[in-house]
Amino acid sequence: MLQVNSSGAPVPFSVQTATGSGQNWLVVTPRTGIAPATLTVTADPAKLAGVTQDDGVITVAGAGNTKTVRVQFTVNTDTLPPVLFSIQAGTLAHLSREILRFQSTGAVVESSPAAPWLSVAAGLATITVSVNPAGLPPGAYEGSVALTGVSGQLLWHVPVKLFV
């Protein structure tokens, strides 16, 4: 959030954004308005293709006064904490858990092919992991879920563990 204030009467303003890479990952809404106002600033990792860090500038201009805010966006490609499932052997129930909420389009979500008991579904703003223990003997199983941007860069890696 970014606050735009006026020391006197309400003042119209406009917002411009620029990024060091030229990629359109930095979004500010609304782009125009009347101060005082609150601006929402978001960064979309799917639009930061090929790099994991970039600088940006937000410029707010109105009534002869211009203010600049510098931002830096770093995509965390570290592994997230594991998602753990535990189920009694012989149970046929599928278990599901929402693991991530995000604001992105065009991202690709995949589960590890070596874990046929693991599936993943991506909605418009959520990722849900499901496990199917049918036919699995008692034991510990490991798999993973990866979220990659449209250009193939890894955004998140989530280990998944199933205990039967």
Image (cartoon, rainbow, N blue to C red):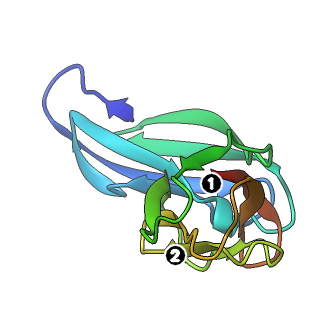
Q: Nearer the viewer, residue 141 or 72?
A: 141
Q: Are marks 1 and 2 in contact (CB under 8 Å)?
A: no
Is 122 situated left or right of 39 in this image? right
Vertical comparison of 42 with 147: above or below: above
Q: Nearer the viewer, residue 1 or 44?
A: 44
**From the image, which quarter does the N terminus lie in?**
top left
- What element does badge 1 sit on? loop
Query: How many numbered callouts?
Result: 2
Residue 72 position, x and y percent, is: 70, 38
From the image, tell me which residue sits under label 1. 164
From the image, tell me which residue sits under label 2. 121
Q: Amino acid at mark 2?
A: Ala
Q: Amino acid at mark 1?
A: Val
Q: Nearer the viewer, residue 51 or 155?
A: 155
**From the image, which quarter does the C terminus lie in?**
bottom right
Q: Alpha carbon of mark 1 to alpha carbon of mark 2: how far? A: 22 Å
Looking at the image, can residue 101 be seen? no
